[in-house]
Image (cartoon, helix red, strand yellow):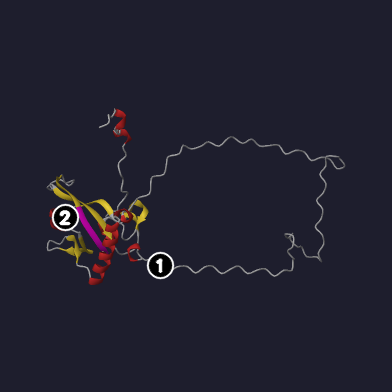
């Protein structure tokens, strides 16, 4: 075994954590086909609300498989609280997403680390409870949605890295540059008429039957018929998800 010095270790101050960027709220995926796979569990998390008991929080891979890209984070009032750069696309896995809603915790907390468990798939929805409150749940997918999800799952698990959502790197901080001071230049006085330094007057354009003609490159006739521009290439149709290509 070769000897190591302290220079072989990474310094804590030089180790940068992995950021996963802003995440859409659960409510922003309402009505979409969603896949959730639990990857971690934390019990006895102190509640931020006074009088409420500690709760269990899951860490999950969350992926929506239908609907438009999500470009912003909305709070419970529907106000934009953060930008998502780039927007999350359907089929992109959002790892390390916290899930603490009771319906999900009760069904997934004992599935963490279970070999072969592929996760839960369904339509995200709100269900009214007898107490009058609403609870986030998942409804069963249709056979067609199940087939689509299986196709996505095989594609994503074959190379997980291509399915992971990757946020844009933060822009580097650049110190502002102060432009140099510009001093006005005094315009030179024109030389008097007859002076050897006076600039000759511009020659008038040659007469062409009373109509001005622009100068043309050699070999181009002013009466040549212009060549029509090629029609634009046909635009491709809407993109299909990568796992269906």
* In the image, residue 224 above or below residue 84: below
Q: Residue 144: which disc? A: none
Q: Which residue is drawn at the image coordinates 78% and 65% (left, top)?
A: 211
Instruction: Place residue 240 in its image quadrant.
Output: bottom left
Q: Earlier in the sequence, mark 1 or mark 2?
A: 2
Secondary structure category for the residue under label 1: loop
Secondary structure category for the residue under label 2: loop
- Cα separation, mark 1 vs mark 2, equals 38 Å
Q: Quadrant of the C terminus?
A: bottom left
Query: In this figure, which residue is indicated by the disc labeled 2?
Result: 115
Of all residues, the one furthest to the front in this rendering is: 1
Residue 172 falls within the magenta-colored stretch: no
Q: Are marks 1 and 2 in contact (CB under 8 Å)?
A: no
Q: Residue 238: which disc? A: 1
Q: Nearer the viewer, residue 32 or 157?
A: 157
Q: Which residue is drawn at the image coordinates 81% and 64% (left, top)?
A: 208
Q: Is residue 245 left or right of residue 230?
A: left
Whole-percent x, y for residue 119 in the image: 20, 59
Q: Nearer the viewer, residue 223 or 124?
A: 223
Q: Residues within 10 Å of mark 1 (few under 14, many from 20)?
A: few
* In the image, residue 47 above or below residue 103: above
Q: Which residues are magenta?
A: 32-38
């Amino acid at each position: 075994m070769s000897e190591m010095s302290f220079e072989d270790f990474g310094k804590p101050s030089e180790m940068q954590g992995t950021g996963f960027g802003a995440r859409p709220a659960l409510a922003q995926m309402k009505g979409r086909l969603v896949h959730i796979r639990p990857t971690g569990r934390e019990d006895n998390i102190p509640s931020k609300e006074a009088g409420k008991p500690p709760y269990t929080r899951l860490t999950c891979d969350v992926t929506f498989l239908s609907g438009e890209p999500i470009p912003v984070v909305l709070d419970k009032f529907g106000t934009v609280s953060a930008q998502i750069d780039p927007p999350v696309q359907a089929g992109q896995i959002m790892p390390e997403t916290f899930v603490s809603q009771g319906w999900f915790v009760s069904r997934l907390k004992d599935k963490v680390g279970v070999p072969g468990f592929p996760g839960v798939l369904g339509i995200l929805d709100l269900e009214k409870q007898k107490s009058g409150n609403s609870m986030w749940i998942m409804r069963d997918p249709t056979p067609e949605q199940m087939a689509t999800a299986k196709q996505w799952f095989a594609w994503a698990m074959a190379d997980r890295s291509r399915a992971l959502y990757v946020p844009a790197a933060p822009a580097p901080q650049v110190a502002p540059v102060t432009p140099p001071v510009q001093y006005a230049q005094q315009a030179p006085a024109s030389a008097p008429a007859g002076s050897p330094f006076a600039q000759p007057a511009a020659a008038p354009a040659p007469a062409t039957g009373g109509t001005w003609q622009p100068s043309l490159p050699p070999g181009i006739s002013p009466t040549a018929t212009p060549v029509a521009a090629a029609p634009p290439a046909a635009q491709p149709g809407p993109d299909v998800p990568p796992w269906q290509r």
